[in-house]
Image (tube, rainbow, N blue to C red):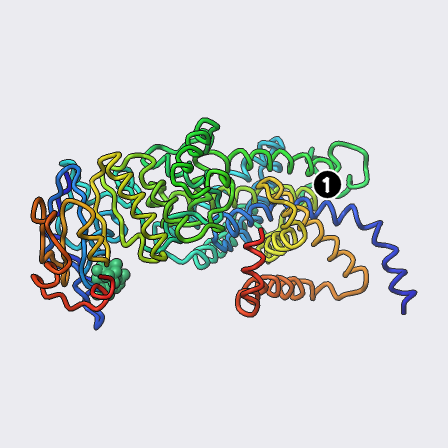
Amino acid sequence: MLELRDLYKTFNPGTVNEKRAIDGLSLTLEDGDFVTIIGGNGAGKSTVLNLISGAIPLDSGSICLDGKDITSLPEFKRAKYLGRVFQDPMMGTAATMGIEENLALANRRGARRGLRPGITSQERVRYREQLASLGLGLETRMTSKVGLLSGGQRQALTLLMATLKKPRLLLLDEHTAALDPKTADKVLQLTEEIVSRDSLTTLMVTHNMKQAIQYGNRLIMMDAGRIVVDIRGQEKKDLTVRDLLEKFNIENDRMLLSE
Amino acid sequence: MLANILGSLATVPGALPGAVAQGLIWGIMAIGVYITFRVLDIADLTVDGSLGTGGAVCIMLMLLGCNVWLAMLGAVIAGLLTGLMTGVFHTFMGIPAILAGILTQLSLYSINLKIMGKANQAINVDKYSLLVSLRWVRKAMLNNPLIMVAIIIVILIAFLYWFFGTELGSGLRATGANPNMSRAQGINTDLNKVLGLMVSNALVAFSGALLSQYQGFADVNMGRGAIVIGLAAVIIGEAIFGRIFRNFALRLLAVVFGSIIYYVVIQIVIQLGLDANLLKLLSALVVAVFLAVPYWKSRYFRRGVKVRKEAE
Ligand SMILES: Nc1ncnc2c1ncn2[C@@H]1O[C@H](COP(=O)(O)OP(=O)(O)OP(=O)(O)O)[C@@H](O)[C@H]1O
Ligand SMILES: [Mg+2]
């Protein structure tokens, strides 16, 4: 359903800071795939997700979603197909707007925004239910400004916003990395629930090898802008952290630490 | 000395209606500034030019025989175009917002001169049926600027309240609040910035149209320093009413109150004998200090601010 073909991306070309972030990367996802992506700092994980979402422009290559070439669509148009949660909890929500207003914005992703009301009372009822299902007590604070929420609450809300209108593809970029372990677990659990409930095709970047093994049906490891490991099916199911470490000789401190 | 001060203060009530009328008219302009500065998070300097454009277009159309409402509509359309110009400079041509505004402002100086044919165009209140005039500021009539502009402001705020509650208006607010998130939610942030700049400058030009009628002339320099007055109104309004006015419509009203307070204070200061030539310097310094307050707070009183935020 998603097909990345020969993606290249170089930052600051022709300067001393020239950096080839993505180096001829190709990847094909099947409908319903839940892929975890690991790799050291600077491997290019975030860049891949940003290329897919159109947040940064591609140098060359093509991106097809459901057989449709979206390579030249601007970011706001691709948003129709994509749900995104970022590493930084500040990034996915509008802090000065209310919780329900943020949800109403997300509910109109991909639709024309005209002069109809920005939020209706039926929507409020629905949002209240959906917020209650997060189990964070947000349903009683519907009009509170999002800026008053904790990082974990904001990430849970962003996740809800990303999936409120079912996306074709869910992009999660270390969306639990900024949270304390307990909150991170909670948000991951929510992620798992929502992804399996709606059978969403998902790309999830993580630094935690345990998570990468525990979640999803396919695991990808990136290094220097390429995919160096791609494990799926039974092999993925049987995978242990030790296997990964041994097999691929990982020498990344951050990954070892989070084992 | 004291008797002197008291003596000059005694003349203030007489000058008050004029100051309030000016405050009301500039309040519309300040609402425009609020939309760019607070909602869109852009400091738009176009306003120094578009205020004059509104005045020039309105006066010239009336001199050509247009009905006053038609002339005002012309001013609003001209204002929309000035916002479009800055918006295109900023989004399509990638010029930083402040610079984009300065470029438009500068070109509007020529354009305003061209519209009027000279630097100043007067309109005779006896020969043309104006909407407001400073002559009527003490008269018990609908065309008393205090009444007329107040009614117009209520209608404008009601319209803006509705607009910013629509899907389009919400998208505009989101664009200012978090452009990243907005694009991720499918909002065309460039388009929304242009739209916001257009709406803002339409209000500013509308205010300019009223102002030129009120004072009986349009002048190529009438908008000089308008951005500072607009910011002063926004800041004063927030400082005094920010804690009690939470609703969007009330926030806009606070901006108008801020503008009125600004003009009343200026009036008092002038009556006390301050050199009128120093006014702009004074306004600029006051605005500078108020703009610095949030920065100082975050820098030197970080904890205090945080605690208060959580208490809310
Ligand atoms: N906007 C940018 N400008 C310049 N270089 C960039 C930019 N974004 C990323 N890079 C560089 O591209 C490379 C890949 O970055 P990317 O953020 O994709 O890595 P990552 O795998 O997400 O790493 P991390 O685990 O630290 O998040 C890095 O070397 C980074 O320095
Ligand atoms: Mg990253």
Number of marks in picture: 1
The residue sitting at the bottom extreme is A16
* Side (left or right) of B180 relative to B153: left
Q: Residue at x 10, y 66 (%)?
A: A249
Mark 1, residues whose alpha carbon is within 10 Å: few (<14), some, or many (≥20)? many
Image position, residue B154 (x, y; %)? 65, 35
Q: Relative to B274, is A220 above or below?
A: above
Q: Residue at x 15, y 68 (%)?
A: A251
| Dot 1: element | loop
Which quarter of the rendering shows the N terminus of chain B? bottom right
Q: Residue at x 47, y 51 (%)?
A: A147
Front-most of residues A108 and A140: A140
The residue sitting at the right extreme is B3
Residue that numbered label 1 is attached to: B133
* Side (left or right) of B51 relative to B216: left
Image position, residue A138 (x, y; %)? 46, 42
Quarter, ligand 2: bottom left
Q: Chain of mark 1?
A: B
Image position, residue A106 (x, y; %)? 37, 38
The residue sitting at the top extreme is A122
Image position, residue B179 (x, y; %)? 39, 49
Q: Residue at x 21, y 63 (%)?
A: A255
| Residue A12 visible in the current orientation | no
* Side (left or right) of A12 relative to B260: left
Front-most of residues B286 and B49: B286
Q: Relative to B280, is A165 above or below?
A: above
Amino acid at the residue labelled 1: Ser
| Residue B199 visible in the current orientation | yes
